[in-house]
Image (cartoon, rainbow, N blue to C red):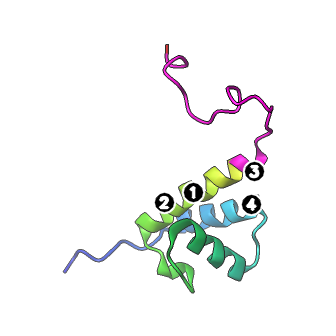
Protein backbone atom coordinates (compact mmCIF):
# COMPACT_ATOMS: atom_id res chain seq x y z
CA UNK A 1 0.00 0.00 0.00
CA UNK A 2 3.04 2.27 -0.13
CA UNK A 3 2.50 2.97 -3.82
CA UNK A 4 0.53 6.18 -3.34
CA UNK A 5 1.78 8.98 -5.60
CA UNK A 6 4.18 11.39 -3.95
CA UNK A 7 2.70 14.82 -3.31
CA UNK A 8 3.91 17.90 -5.14
CA UNK A 9 6.80 19.53 -3.28
CA UNK A 10 6.88 23.12 -2.05
CA UNK A 11 9.71 23.73 -4.51
CA UNK A 12 7.57 22.50 -7.41
CA UNK A 13 4.63 24.62 -6.22
CA UNK A 14 6.88 27.72 -6.18
CA UNK A 15 8.28 26.88 -9.63
CA UNK A 16 4.75 26.47 -11.01
CA UNK A 17 3.76 29.87 -9.58
CA UNK A 18 6.84 31.39 -11.21
CA UNK A 19 6.07 29.76 -14.57
CA UNK A 20 2.48 31.00 -14.51
CA UNK A 21 3.77 34.50 -13.65
CA UNK A 22 6.21 34.39 -16.59
CA UNK A 23 3.25 33.54 -18.83
CA UNK A 24 1.13 36.32 -17.31
CA UNK A 25 -1.52 33.83 -16.14
CA UNK A 26 -2.54 35.09 -12.70
CA UNK A 27 -6.17 34.04 -12.18
CA UNK A 28 -6.65 30.56 -10.72
CA UNK A 29 -9.39 29.67 -13.22
CA UNK A 30 -7.07 30.61 -16.10
CA UNK A 31 -4.26 28.54 -14.56
CA UNK A 32 -6.58 25.54 -14.18
CA UNK A 33 -7.70 25.95 -17.81
CA UNK A 34 -4.08 26.04 -18.98
CA UNK A 35 -3.29 22.92 -16.94
CA UNK A 36 -6.17 21.16 -18.67
CA UNK A 37 -5.00 22.35 -22.09
CA UNK A 38 -1.44 21.16 -21.53
CA UNK A 39 -2.11 17.92 -19.66
CA UNK A 40 -5.66 16.93 -20.52
CA UNK A 41 -6.32 16.75 -16.78
CA UNK A 42 -9.01 18.92 -15.19
CA UNK A 43 -8.02 20.04 -11.70
CA UNK A 44 -9.82 22.12 -9.09
CA UNK A 45 -6.90 22.52 -6.71
CA UNK A 46 -3.10 22.39 -6.95
CA UNK A 47 -3.27 19.42 -4.58
CA UNK A 48 -4.85 17.45 -7.46
CA UNK A 49 -1.36 17.20 -8.99
CA UNK A 50 1.14 14.68 -7.70
CA UNK A 51 4.92 15.10 -7.88
CA UNK A 52 5.28 13.50 -11.32
CA UNK A 53 2.36 15.41 -12.86
CA UNK A 54 3.65 18.69 -11.44
CA UNK A 55 7.09 18.08 -12.94
CA UNK A 56 5.64 17.30 -16.37
CA UNK A 57 3.44 20.41 -16.18
CA UNK A 58 6.40 22.54 -15.14
CA UNK A 59 8.38 21.41 -18.19
CA UNK A 60 5.49 22.32 -20.49
CA UNK A 61 4.86 25.69 -18.83
CA UNK A 62 8.54 26.64 -19.02
CA UNK A 63 8.71 25.58 -22.66
CA UNK A 64 5.67 27.72 -23.42
CA UNK A 65 7.13 30.69 -21.51
CA UNK A 66 10.45 30.34 -23.33
CA UNK A 67 8.67 30.26 -26.69
CA UNK A 68 6.64 33.34 -25.77
CA UNK A 69 9.80 35.33 -25.07
CA UNK A 70 11.79 34.02 -28.04
CA UNK A 71 12.23 36.52 -30.84
CA UNK A 72 11.63 35.09 -34.29
CA UNK A 73 14.21 35.99 -36.90
CA UNK A 74 12.05 34.81 -39.78
CA UNK A 75 14.74 32.28 -40.65
CA UNK A 76 13.53 28.70 -40.08
CA UNK A 77 17.09 27.41 -39.68
CA UNK A 78 18.05 30.04 -37.10
CA UNK A 79 14.72 29.70 -35.25
CA UNK A 80 14.82 25.89 -34.91
CA UNK A 81 14.33 24.65 -31.37
CA UNK A 82 16.35 21.44 -31.41
CA UNK A 83 19.90 20.68 -32.36
CA UNK A 84 20.49 18.88 -35.63
CA UNK A 85 23.25 16.44 -36.39
CA UNK A 86 25.21 19.33 -37.89
CA UNK A 87 25.06 21.26 -34.60
CA UNK A 88 26.41 18.20 -32.77
CA UNK A 89 29.54 17.93 -34.96
In percent of the image, x 22 and y 76: which residue is there? 2
Tell me the distance, in whole angstroms, between the alpha carbons under discs 2 and 1: 6 Å
In percent of the image, x 55 and y 63: which residue is there? 11
> Is residue 21 in the magenta section?
no
Tell me the distance, in whole angstroms, between the alpha carbons under discs 3 and 1: 12 Å
Q: Position of residue 81 (x, y in %)?
A: 61, 36
Q: Name the residue under label 4.
A: 23
Q: Position of residue 43 (x, y in %)?
A: 54, 82
Q: Name the residue under label 3.
A: 68
Q: Earlier in the sequence, mark 4 or mark 1?
A: 4
Q: Where is residue 75 in the image (x, y as percent from the top left)?
A: 75, 28
Q: Quick one: 7 or 64, which is closer to the camera?
A: 64
The extreme bottom residue here reads 44
Q: In the figure, 86 relative to 14: above or below?
A: above
Q: Name the residue under label 2.
A: 56
Q: Quick one: 83 or 31, which is closer to the camera?
A: 83
Residue 46 location, quadrant: bottom right
Q: Mark 1 points at which residue?
A: 60
Amino acid sequence: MGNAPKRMSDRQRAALRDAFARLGVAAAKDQFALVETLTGQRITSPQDLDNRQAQALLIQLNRRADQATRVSTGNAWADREEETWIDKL
